[in-house]
Amino acid sequence: MEAQPNGHNVNEPETELTEMLEVVVLPEESGTHEHCIYKVPQKIRLVNPQAYTPRIISIGPFHSPHGSNSDENNLQEMEELKLKYLKGFLNRTNISVDDLVFKVKELENKIRNCYAARFDNKDFVKFIIVDACFIIEHFLRYKSEINWKKDDPILMKPWLLNDIFRDLLLLENQLPFFVLDEIYKLANINREHESFITITIHYFNEFNLQNLNSEHFTDPNKLPEHFTDLLRTFLLPSSFEFTHQETGITDHAKEQVYSMSQLSEAGLKFELSDSKCLLDLKFDKGVLKMPFFLVHDSTERYVRNILAFEECHISDKRSAYISQYFTLLDMLINTEKDVSILVDKKIIINWTSDANAVATIVNTLCKNASMPKYNAEYLSLFKRLNDFYENPRNKYKAVFVHEYFNTPWKKVSTLTAVSLVLFTLIQAVCSIWSLVKSYKDKK
C-alpha cells in the first residue's frame, strides 16, 4: 500500500469512512417521523432562554438531574419528592414496581423514538417510571384537592403548585402521553371510570390559560402527543375549517397588514367575538371581530413552547395554525397604543397591567422562527383589511386623523383651530348680515 510522507496510508480515509457508514442508517430509516419531543432550536431559545427551561422540576430525559444532558442542579431537590409520590401512587393501587418496570420496558423503544435525541442512560426506564407516576399521582391529588390540601407538600403551597404547572407546559419537559395513559390504565384506578385525558383536562383548565376547547378529546382513542401538544390542540376549533392554499413563500413575504391604530384611524371598528377559538377572526362591513386573548404571567411561556413545537414538529407550515395567528397579531400590534385599543374593546384581557409589555411579548414571540404559510382564510383576511385601509376615502381619513388627532395635544390644537375658524366665520356672517340689514333699513 502506498504511503504518504507523514506515514499515513493513502486509503486510510476510505477505510475510516467505510467503517463509519457501517453503523449509519439511512435518513428515512432513522425514525425522525416518530419524534414529538424536541430540544428547542438554539436560534429560538436565545430570544428568551428562561421560557423553555424548567425552573423547579424536570420531566423526561432532556433535563434530568441524573443525566449527562443537564446542568440544572437546582432540579435535584424535587427528586426526593417524586419518589414520595411514586410510593403514594403504589399505595393507592394494586400494582407493584415489577409491574411498572415490565410495562415501561415493553414500551421502551416506542418511548425512546419520541425524543429527538439519543439517550444511552441505563436508568432511562427508571426515570420514566418515576416521572410518570409523579404526574399521575399529582393530578389525582389535585382532582381531590379537598382531601389532600392540608397534608400534600405541593397543594399546601400555592407557589409550588404554580411553578410545577408552569414547568409541565415546556416542550423539553415532556413524557409521551401514551406512557401516562398506559400506566393509569394498568393501575385500574376506579374514579367513576374517568379517563386520564379527562383528569388532565381538568388540571389544565384550572389555570386560566385561555379558552380551552376539550371537545377534541371526546373520542378516547384520540390522544395528544404530550401536554404541549394538548395545549396547542385546545386552541383549535372542534371542526377545523381552515383550508390550505398552494402559495409559495414569496407570496407570503408580500403580505403585510396595517396596525391596529392605522386601521382604527381609517374607521375600522373592533369588536369582541363570542367565539371560543382564539384563531377565529371575522371581518365584515368594516368590523373586525376577535375572540378574547388573556395575557398573564404564564402566557409568554405557554405560547412560546407551543410555537416551538410547531416549528419542530409540523413540516407543512400551512398547518402551523398557532404560528400563523401570532405572526398576524405581531403585524396588528406594534405599540402600546395598538394594545390599548384591544384592551378598551376587552379583546385583550391584560393581567400584567402593562400595555407596553404586552406589545413586546407579541412582537418577539415568533422571532427567529420559520415564516408560516398562511391558510386561505388568513390570506383573504389580509387582503380585505388592506383593501379597507387603502380605499381612498378611508386612507385620507386615516391621514387626517393621524395628522390632526393623533395625540391629546394635536386634538386640543385642532379643536382650538376649528373653533377659532368657526368663531371667525360666525363673526364674518354676523358682520355681513348687519351690513345687509343696515342697507335695507336705509332704503
Image: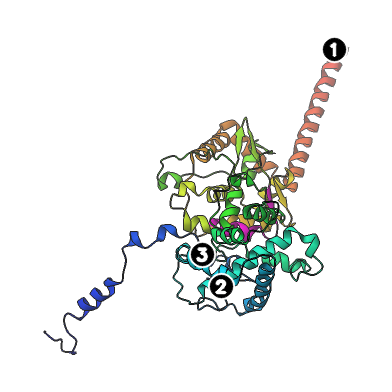
Along the line of sight, the residue nearer the viewer: 135 or 173: 135
Q: Secondary structure at mark 1?
A: helix
The location of residue 285, given as percent across then percent down, is 62, 29
> Which residue is at 55% across, 48% downward?
221
The secondary structure that dominates the magenta segment is helix
Amino acid identity at mark 3: Val
Which contiguous range is marked in magenta? 293-307
Side of 101 where 252 appears, left or right: left
Q: Observer-nearest residue: 133 or 372? A: 133
Q: How is the image coloured?
A: rainbow
- The residue type indicated by label 1 comes to Lys
* Residue under the image location 56 percent in, 71 percent down: 98
The image's mark for residue 440 is 1
Q: 138 or 98: nearer the eye? A: 98
Q: Residue at x 51, y 73 (%)?
A: 124
Residue 323 horizontal/vertical position (percent): 53, 51
Element type at marker 3?
loop
Q: Earlier in the sequence, mark 3 or mark 2?
A: 3
Pointer 1: residues within 10 angstroms few (<14), some, or many (20+)? few
- The percent position of residue 159, horizontal first and vertical second, equals 75, 68
Give the vertical position of 142 relative to 118 (above or below).
above
Report the disc number at residue 127: 2
Disc 3: which residue? 40
Looking at the image, can residue 295 be seen? Answer: no
**Mark toward the viewer: 2 or 1:** 2
Per the model, the C-alpha gap separating discs 3 and 1 is: 89 Å
Helix, strand or loop under label 2: helix
Magenta highlight on residue 96: no
Precedes in sequence: disc 2 or disc 1:
2
Marks 3 and 2 sit apart, C-alpha to C-alpha, by 21 Å
The single residue placed furthest to the left in the displayed view is 2
Q: Amino acid at mark 2?
A: Phe
